[in-house]
Image (cartoon, helix red, strand yellow):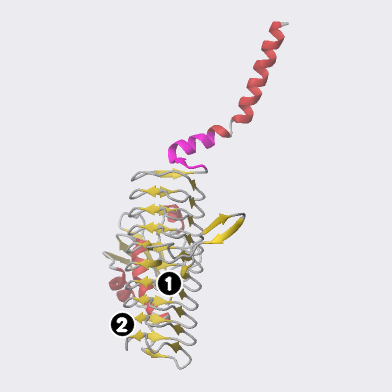
């Protein structure tokens, strides 16, 4: 599919406050400043790339209002409040064109229980399975090879990409997006050693995703041992994330790739967990807590805390400890030299 936009269309879509320069052509693609051609739109989303703007061949560039510079010949600057968000507005249009919402209806190869309820405006793709008394709400899209268990609920306008599994009794809110391979409602990791044997503990709870939650590819959210595992409204979960049983995640959190959260831990609202960070079980993180990448957390963190390192420490302290640790070889040499001097003096 070919996409083309005039400068006037781009101005409207991105909410540009002003337009500088002239370009009579059309824009057919999006590219980085370094790789763009005259048919591409690019953007200055990070000040570290400001030096590349003057050299870019892009036909149109989204720049912040305060950017100092002028467009080259045949180039247009679209000045916006936030270039990254302005680009997202355009990409939402492109996304709808590239991946249009499938037509309502149920594919002939889908297997749907006679007791399940599928809204007429929903789409159910090839080889999907929908269990007893499950519900798929209006406007939902269930792509190929998805499994929806017994009494599960899929909210309005939620989109399940191919190969998603939603376990029995789990509930997904409205406007959620679940990427391929994600598993919502796998058994929690519950076992107990009894008389030298490891016995399985049944996991009889469920998983509840509130509205506008997104879950990345191959992430897993375990059903609760009892009650529910909860992800709050608007939270975004990256690829390859493990959320254990009875975890409760607040609203508008960002959980990035390869994060692991152990059982019965609670996160407040607006928390941010960096890539590969790990959180031990039965902890409480307050609102707006941040964990740096690869942080290993073993203690509660109050609201607005920023932790880093393993074992985790407040960010400023952990950075100082890293700097000091690099000076340890030099310090040991000085201590050895001082000890040798004292021994020599004693003789």
Q: How far apart are marks 1 and 2 (CA)?
A: 17 Å
Q: Check disc 1 and report the residue beneath it.
A: 178
Q: Is the magenta stretch mostly helix, strand or loop?
A: helix
- Going by the picture, which residue comes out furthest to the left? 17
Compared with 6, 321 (above or below) is above
How many residues crowd around disc 1 within 10 Å: few (fewer than 14), some, or many (20 or more)? many
On the question of residue 70 being in view, the answer is yes
Residue nearest the observer in this picture, 214 or 90:
214
| Location of residue 155 with respect to 219 vertically, above or below | below
- Mark carried by residue 138: 2
Query: The N terminus lies in which quarter of the figure?
Result: bottom left
Q: Where is residue 347 in the image (x, y as percent from the top left)?
A: 73, 5
Verify CB contact (< 8 Å) between mark 1 and mark 2. no
Helix, strand or loop for disc 1: strand
Task: Find the magenta span and give its range.
Answer: 311-323
Looking at the rendered structure, the secondary structure element under dot 2 is loop
* Residue beneath the point at 47% across and 80% down: 146
Q: Where is residue 284 in the image (x, y as percent from the top left)?
A: 38, 48
Residue at screen point 45% across, 94% down: 108
Residue 25 visible to the viewer = no
In front: 53, or 82? 82
Checking the image for residue 344, the label placed there is: none
């Amino acid at each position: 599919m070919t996409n083309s936009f005039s400068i006037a269309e781009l101005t409207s879509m991105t909410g540009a406050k002003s337009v500088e320069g002239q370009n009579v052509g059309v824009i057919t693609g999006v590219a980085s400043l370094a790789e763009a051609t005259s048919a591409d739109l690019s953007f200055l989303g990070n000040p570290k790339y400001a030096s590349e703007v003057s050299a870019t061949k892009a036909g149109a560039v989204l720049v912040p209002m305060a950017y100092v510079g002028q467009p080259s010949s045949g180039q247009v600057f679209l000045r916006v409040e936030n270039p990254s968000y302005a680009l997202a507005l355009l990409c939402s249009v492109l996304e709808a064109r590239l991946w249009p919402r499938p037509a309502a209806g149920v594919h002939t190869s889908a297997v749907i229980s006679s007791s399940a309820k599928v809204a007429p405006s929903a789409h159910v793709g090839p080889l999907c399975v929908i269990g007893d008394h499950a519900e798929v709400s209006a406007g939902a899209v269930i792509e190929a090879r998805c499994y929806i268990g017994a009494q599960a609920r899929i909210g309005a306008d939620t989109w399940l990409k191919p190969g998603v599994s939603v376990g029995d009794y789990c509930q997904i809110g409205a406007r959620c997006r679940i990427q391929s391979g994600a598993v919502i409602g796998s058994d929690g990791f519950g076992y107990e050693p009894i008389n030298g044997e490891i016995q399985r503990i049944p996991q009889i709870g469920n998983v509840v995703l509130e509205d506008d939650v997104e879950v990345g590819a191959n992430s897993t959210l375990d059903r609760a041992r009892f009650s529910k595992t909860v992800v709050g409204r608007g939270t975004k979960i990256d690829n390859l994330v493990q959320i254990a049983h009875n975890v409760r995640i607040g609203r508008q959190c960002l959980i990035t790739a390869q994060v692991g959260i152990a059982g019965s831990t609670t996160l407040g609202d607006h928390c941010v967990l960096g890539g590969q960070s790990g959180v031990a079980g039965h902890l409480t993180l307050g609102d707006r807590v941040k964990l740096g990448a690869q942080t290993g957390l073993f203690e509660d963190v109050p609201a607005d805390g920023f932790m880093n390192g393993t074992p985790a420490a407040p960010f400023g302290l952990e950075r100082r400890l890293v700097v000091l640790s690099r000076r340890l070889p030099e310090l040991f040499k000085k201590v050895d030299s001082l000890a040798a001097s004292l021994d020599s003096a004693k003789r």
